[in-house]
Image (cartoon, helix red, strand yellow):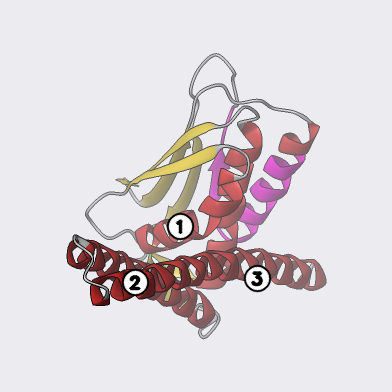
Amino acid sequence: MSEMREDNGLAFFGRVTASVSHEMNNVLAIVNELAGLMNDLLYGVKQGGDGGLERLGQTAEGIQKQIRRGEEIVKRLNRFAHSVDDPVSRFDLNAVIADMAAMAQRRAALKGVRFETKLCQEPLTITGFRFDIQRLAFAGLELASAALEGGGTVSIESRHQEYRAEARMTALAWKENDDVRKMKDNLSEEMRRLNGNLFWEPDADISSPIVFSFPIAQ
């Protein structure tokens, strides 16, 4: 079991870092393109061209926007890297869902799937190994993406349900095939091992949610 867990962890780590590095490369590529445009505009202004100053301001704003985007990507990656620091800790499930949805979005987009998060305002504090909970949340998002064969939007919500913290993923027209069933069964087993539960009865005619449930920390 420990070897399987280690293999799953390494595969998850690889998928996340590959996605994050690709996203960071996109940021750098856009900044490089905008910097080249700024050089062209500066040359035009020096030559007495009209309208260059306004476009220079717009280009500078575009660069600042990408810098902020890059800073957020690095912050998420830093939180992800430190999630292995403590084998048992208390943390907010909302923060885990938000980070994993952002990190899984690029892979989902390749299948035409978009994540829409509407997380509750109150903290949903749970106890466990944060890295493992992140891995399960990421796997749940990949399950949702795989079950939307034609693409679409997955609405992700969180709530405090009595003594448990829940994350719910809802979409229209789920498709359950052999691969999706295998992903679901594996994820259910992993959830039980970590004192959580997975509820999902896929139905193409109704928007039955994928529900992750963990005990609230006392």
Q: Position of residue 202 (x, y in %)?
A: 60, 26
The N terminus: image quadrant: bottom right
Which of these two is toward me, 79 or 8?
79
Give, as a three-letter code, the residue at label 2: Met
Residue 207 in sight in this render: yes
- The answer to whether residue 59 is left or right of residue 114 is left
Q: Which residue is mark 3?
A: 13
On whether residue 100 falls in the magenta region, the answer is no
Between 192 and 95, the residue placed more toward the observer is 95
- Binning the other alpha carbons within 10 Å of mark 2 as few (below 14), some (14 to 19) or many (20 upward) gives many
Which percent across, then down, holds residue 169?
A: 47, 39
* Residue at x-position 23% and y-position 65%: 49
Q: Earlier in the sequence, mark 3 or mark 2?
A: 3
Disc 3/disc 1 C-alpha distance (Å): 15 Å
Q: Is label 3 or label 2 in front?
A: 2
Which quadrant holds residue 143? top right
Measured in 3D between alpha carbons, the distance from the residue under mark 3 to the one under mark 2, in whole angstroms, is 37 Å
Residue 92 spot, x, y in % from top left: 35, 65
Residue type, mark 3 in image: Phe
User: Is residue 185 located in the magenta-colored stretch of the structure?
Assistant: yes
Q: What's drawn in magenta, residue-wise?
A: 182-201
Q: Is residue 154 above or below residue 4?
A: above
Identify the residue under disc 2.
38
- Magenta span: predominant SS is helix
